[in-house]
Amino acid sequence: MSNKYEIKIEEKVLLLNETVFDRQKISEYEKVAIFKLYKERMIIEMAMETTCYNDLKVYGNIWFDIERKIQELMKFQKNDNFIKFWTVPNCSCQKEENEKLFPTGNYKVNSFCSVHGQNN
């Protein structure tokens, strides 16, 4: 018996660890809601891979909101510092540097990033 839940959309697969659901005492109802949010996130990420430049910021904001909802439903501390925003498609923020800084919140944002930058 596997201890993972699998969410699959086209060729994309996301595995979620059942142990985390058990540890956080996630109900079946909450699991369904969490799975739906993860599917939404995957759809947003797929759209971000092929969308036009002008829509990336909008999709990035939707993605971030979904991450916040997942945090809440998973009964984790609500903290934006635990959201790895630099993992979204077409993000040009410094991935390795941000991974090293995780979860301090002192992340590096590329001002010209098409998803997160202020100068685009």
Image (cartoon, rainbow, N blue to C red):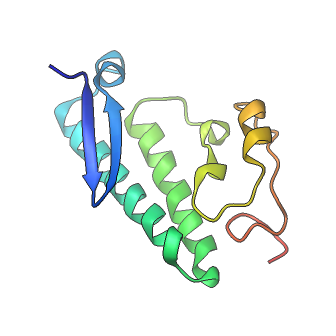
Residue beneath the point at 85% across and 65% down:
111
Residue beneath the point at 67% across and 38% down:
81
Query: Residue 17 appears in which quarter of the rendering?
Result: top left
Q: Position of residue 49 (x, y in %)?
A: 52, 69
Residue beneath the point at 85% across and 74% down:
119
Side of 97 relative to 103 (left or right): right
Residue beneath the point at 26% across and 39% down:
6
Quick one: which residue is furthest to the left in this view? 1
Side of 120 relative to 38 (left or right): right
Does residue 108 sit above or below 55 in this rendering? above
Q: Position of residue 52 (x, y in %)?
A: 57, 83
Q: Position of residue 36 (x, y in %)?
A: 28, 52
Query: Residue 112 appears in which quarter of the rendering?
Result: bottom right
Side of 96 relative to 75 (left or right): right
Does residue 20 sit above or below 89 in this rendering? above
> Which quadrant does the N terminus fall into?
top left
Q: Position of residue 24 (x, y in %)?
A: 36, 21
> Which quadrant does the C terminus fall into?
bottom right
Using the image as rendered, state which of residue 79 and residue 57 is in the foreground.
Answer: 57
Query: Residue 104 appears in which quarter of the rendering?
Result: top right
Label count reads 0
Does residue 99 sit above or below 12 in this rendering? above
Using the image as rendered, state which of residue 14 and residue 56 is in the foreground.
Answer: 14
